[in-house]
Image (cartoon, rainbow, N blue to C red):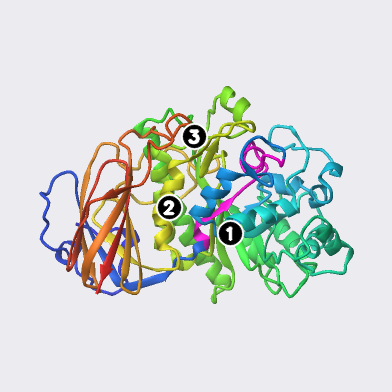
Amino acid sequence: MPITRRRLIQSAGAASLASLLPRAVFSQGAGARKAVIHADQEIGTIRPELHSHFAEHLGSCVYGGIWVGKKSSIPNINGYRQATVDYLKELGVPVLRWPGGCFADDYHWRDGVGPAEKRPKTVNTNWGGYTEDNSFGTNEFMEFCKLIGAEPYLAANVGTGSPEEMRDWMEYCNYPSGSTLSDLRAAGGSPEPFRVRYWGVGNELWGCGGNFRAEQAAAEFRHFATFARVFGNVRPFLVGCGPNQNNLAWTRGFMDTLVGNRQPDGYSVHHYSDANLPPLAYTPEAMYAQFNTFRRVEQTIVQQRNLLDSYDPNRRVGLFLDEWGVWDHGISADDERRNGRLWQQQTMRSAVAAGLGLNAFNRQADKLYMCNIAQMVNVLQSMLITDGPEGKNCVRTTSYYAFMLFKPHRTKTSVHTQSDASEAPLANGPAAGGRGGGKQATEPPPDLSVSASRQGNQLIVTLVNPRHDTDMQVDCAVRGVSCRSGSAQILHDPDLNAYNSFDNQNRVTIKPHSVNVEQGRVAVDLPRLSVVTVTVEAA
């Protein structure tokens, strides 16, 4: 069996995969798969920030999803939807990026501070042209982050804003007291500074953020960075605007312009996984085309990091995947009318897609600083679904449970894995079909996906079966530790369009799963369309 490209072991003359594996306990049928986990070959720490999130003023993500208002009949905590707070606190959100997205470069933060009744009503020209009352602004966002335990990440306005506006926002957020802006923050109910570290300098400057060329975007970064001040001993961590997908020419142009000047602390790439179908109308072929985009996401991570290393060999510039996830199309007019723009039901397909992405992040943990799934509530690949601004239902999606299965990996050290699953070569260019990619006719269906991490005597292994027609029996050899015992959890439904509805909120949830753990091996069944996390106690 060939060793897959992603799992190459760096030592020369490594033994073939077949010779490394123990005698299989499964018959060699269509569903038999083999893997090797090298628990003693470290990749890097899986930062909790790789499981971060993104919330934009888009559809009902903020208004109706997060914020229902203090006078709402929906159970709430000072205006925040109670269920949203409870579920996200349970999930554990490391970092939350806000207010956009395209919305960020048309948003002026002063519109969302001060007495709520005096805030201006503004038009959201990016997403539907509706009028919002700005009742959810900076103070409200910071309080929400506090409620769910997330660190805030603000996207500053470059497209229609100014360096002065960003500088003032930093003072408003971080200066302890005594200035007009810090006193304005205190008057809004927050006397203590917010101590915001993460600042995005614009969003998608290659598109909705201004249609800049890379060199222009870098010049804007240089200009804005000049006035990014330290307030309250908080040094701003500035994130520069990288490309859409794996546009290496953009990165060269951006970084060339900054040679000899301040480098960004972070560099943001956006990479969605598009498909031109409504969320509940996927065929297996369309699902596989979407799943295969995660190979290109992983290629983007590797190649963008390698290019950044040529400018920044000490890796002082962190690679951010600021927006990622499945982006379905053809949402019904009724759904959008009830629930807002880009409202998207999450299915078993969505959960498997999340597993493929998070496995890729684990495998490339040494190259990544932060990843933000788009978006938190209702919009695109969301963790929660609500039934409109007046509805009291709040449902944990399949993607929510996929993230829960990966939570044990946080802070552990990613280790090398190998698999005998077939893997097609990655496409050289961007995929067809929009922002994140579409069908590549030459690519075979995806196969078994594996990642693993270790901390002390605990080994965590997550396996994903993306096939709709194959139940897999996976036999994993474990090298570098002696296995004592193990337990497993599974997220599974054989119907790729299965989802948690308002009427059946627990159709797809995490359940215990059987696993066979011996001294040097882990054997587990992976039914079709499933994500399984195995916890191994090792000597």
Q: Residue 345 carries which label?
A: 3
Q: Closest to the observer: 295 or 398?
A: 398
Residue lying farthest to the top in this orientation? 334
Q: According to the image, label 2 marks what residue?
A: 404
Looking at the picture, how far across and down is residue 32, in whole percent?
18, 49
Q: Magenta stretch: give its range.
A: 49-70
Labels 2 & 1 near each other (Cβ < 8 A):
no
Q: Is residue 444 left or right of residue 111?
A: left
N-terminal of the pair, mark 2 or mark 3, is 3
Q: Is residue 493 magenta?
A: no
Instruction: Please rate how many residues cluster around mark 1, counting C-alpha atoms within 10 Å: few if below 14, some from 14 to 19, many from 20.
Output: some
Q: Quadrant of the N terminus?
A: bottom left
Q: Which mark is residue 149?
A: 1
Q: In this view, does 203 lie above or below 461?
A: above
Looking at the picture, how far across and down is residue 40, in whole percent?
30, 74
**Callout 3: helix, strand or loop?**
loop
Q: In which quarter of the image is the C terminus?
A: bottom left
Q: Residue 516 carries which label?
A: none
Instruction: Please rate how many residues cluster around mark 2, counting C-alpha atoms within 10 Å: few if below 14, some from 14 to 19, many from 20.
Output: some
Labels 1 & 3 near each other (Cβ < 8 A):
no
Q: Is residue 232 above or below residue 441?
A: below
